[in-house]
Amino acid sequence: MILVHGVLHLELPEAHSLKGRRRVVNALKERLRRMNLSVIDLSGAYVREADLAFAYLAHDTRQAAQIRESIEGVMERHFPEYESEIEFEEF
């Protein structure tokens, strides 16, 4: 089994309040949880940025890569208006 830990950093230039940021972050967290990922919001007080940490288990490196591609696909399909950066680490 492989444990994969990742951090997703989002730029939210259109968010003007914490409520606006929370709306986007909660929608993204729900999408990731549907993929059986554990997700937590690490965001600070800055409204126009968000950081989400996530983790998942995979049977092998191939499955880990498939899930990684799925996460990137979710960002491209459902949140294309936001600039994002994803860092992955496998154990």
Image (spheres, rainbow, N blue to C red):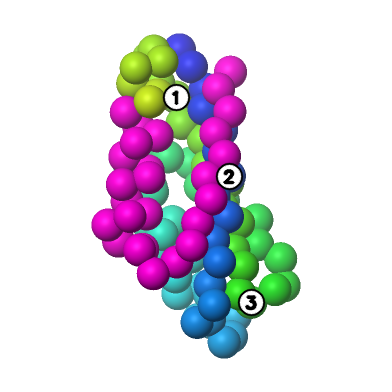
Res. 34 visible in picture: no
Q: What residue sits right under mark 1 in the picture?
A: 57
**C-alpha gap between disc 1 and disc 2:** 15 Å
88 magenta-colored:
yes
Magenta highlight on residue 41: no
> Which mark is on residue 7?
2
Quarter-of-image position of residue 36:
top left
Residue 74: x and y in percent read 32, 51
Query: Image check: 53 left or right of 26?
Result: right
Position of residue 5 relative to residue 91, above or below, is: below
Categorize mark 2 by other alpha carbons within 10 Å: few (<14), some (14-19), many (20+). Answer: some
Q: Earlier in the sequence, mark 1 or mark 2?
A: 2
**Along the line of sight, which residue is nearer the eye, 76 or 25?**
76
Left/right placement of residue 3 relative to residue 33 reads: right
Q: Which of 7 and 39 is in front in this view?
A: 7
- Magenta stretch, residue numbers: 66-91
Residue at disc 3, secondary structure? loop
Query: Which mark is first along the chain, 1 or 3?
Result: 3
22 versus 10 height, above or below:
below
Image quarter hosting the C terminus: top right
- Pointer 3: what residue? 47
The three-letter code of the residue at mark 2 reads Val
Q: Which of marks 3 and 2 is nearer the N terminus?
A: 2
> How many C-alpha atoms fall within 10 Å of the one at disc 1: few (<14), some, or many (≥20)?
some
Image quadrant for the N terminus? top left
Q: Which amino acid does label 3 sit on?
A: Val
